[in-house]
Image (cartoon, rainbow, N blue to C red):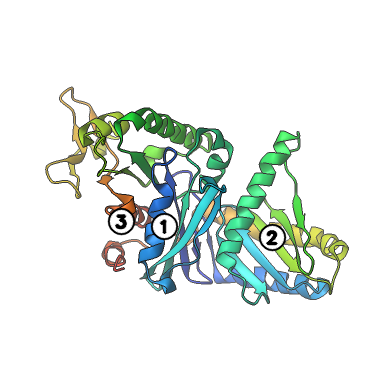
Amino acid sequence: MINYASREINCKIVYYGPGLGGKTTNLEHVYGKVKPETRGKLISLATETERTLFFDFLPVDLGTIRGFKTRFHLYTVPGQVYYNASRKLILKNVDGIVFVGDSQAERMEANLESMQNLYDNMAEYGYDLTQMPFVIQYNKRDLPNAAPIEDLQAALNPGWEVEDASKHRVQPDPYHAGQNLVEQLPGGEWVERAPYFEAIAVQGDGVFDTLKAVSKLVLKALA
Amino acid sequence: MTAGTANWSFTQDDFTAITESLSRFLGETKSLCALLVDRSGQLVTTVGNAPGLDTTAFATLTAADYSANDQLAKLVGENDFSSLFHQGEKESIYVADIARRLLLVIIFDSRTTVGLVRLRMKDEVEELTLLIDRVFSRGRSGDAPEHLLKGADDEIDKLFNW
């Protein structure tokens, strides 16, 4: 939303993913690291055991662009399966999505279920996830039972078909040398994948890389 | 902007008209403060006096509150609850839907009554609905100054200097 009167650009980014994957931890790290004058309060609607009940919310000011203050509203959703009604509410009018996957091999099923749930909830609003700012974060890379990135990519980010012929050109992945975001498969089909990041959110690794990437995509979608 | 997301913008004229309308409402009902919030939780504008209020957090929680109540309404077979009232010991809030896009939040205290706020709210909602419809119809017809960020890639890249 662009407010010409108050000269503000407000964008909404939602962190989505399975329960206990590290969505809230991402926000807590951002809250702890950015200057107090550039962020608001971190609001958590959580249960007594600190599981997200409705959402966490953190407003962050990125700076000024063309004289407009750019403010990002970061939200998390409750990851637990049975909170879908509240999870869906948070997606309303979303501008960008971060999917926080749990790298642990035994959480693969939960990751897949959450990703499918994201597609379904977005589709119910008429949003097309493949046409909007969307990045994936593979969290908990430090754990010994973390699955290889290739396995996670194959399961959660296999790519969607690019039907528009004008976009049939190789687009390198700026974050991973030698990899591509858009490419042609051996079978001739063109696919696009979401940018991905490895993270250890409890230590802050990868948290800002992820946020910067999705923020840029959101602003460039406006441009 | 990409398909499906909020795609609209306020101009100075919209803002002036909305502010004038809300100021009139506050004067007539002796309420403290009015906030206009979009359904995704972003604050559009504040009119009146609310010292110490964290308006950003307030806007987000209002939208979440209203959305949750919207779903509650559906569970009991209603299309929606068109307004919400939260009563406090000193201050209370009244929330009403505007054109299914925005929420009008009125904060008031014992200098007025919920009856007066509610009575005047109906006209205010109608007036704001006309103003807001104008904003959205312009957004859809593509006349809005949407190209603010065109060619601003370099500036965007420079933003991230935390």
Labels 3, 1: one chain: yes
Position in image of residue A160 (x %, y %) = 31, 32
Q: CA distance from mark 1 to mark 2?
A: 31 Å
Position in image of residue A85 (x %, y %) = 58, 37
At x 70%, y 57%, the residue is B129
Q: Quadrant of the C terminus of chain A?
A: bottom left
Label 2 marks which chain's residue?
A: B
Q: CA distance from mark 3 to mark 2?
A: 38 Å
Label 1 marks which chain's residue?
A: A
Q: Nearer the viewer, residue A1 or A152?
A: A152
Q: Amino acid at mark 3?
A: Gly
SS type, badge 2: strand
Picture layout, residue A12 above or below residue B155: above
For label 2, the crowd category at 10 Å Cα-Cα, with few meaning under 14, some 14 to 19 and many 20 or more, is many
SS type, badge 1: helix
Q: Which residue is mark 3?
A: A204
* Residue A213 at least partly seen: no
Residue A148 horizontal side relative to residue A133, left or right:
left
- Counting labels gives 3
For label 1, the crowd category at 10 Å Cα-Cα, with few meaning under 14, some 14 to 19 and many 20 or more, is some
For label 3, the crowd category at 10 Å Cα-Cα, with few meaning under 14, some 14 to 19 and many 20 or more, is some
Picture layout, residue A142 above or below residue A7: above
Residue A134 horizontal side relative to residue A8, left or right:
left
Q: Which residue is mark 1?
A: A28
* Residue A140 at least partly seen: yes
Q: Amino acid at mark 2?
A: Leu
Q: Nearer the viewer, residue B154 or A216?
A: A216
Position in image of residue B131 (x %, y %) = 66, 61
Residue B161 horizontal side relative to residue A61, left or right:
left
Q: Which residue is mark 2?
A: B104
Q: Nearer the viewer, residue A49 or A15?
A: A49
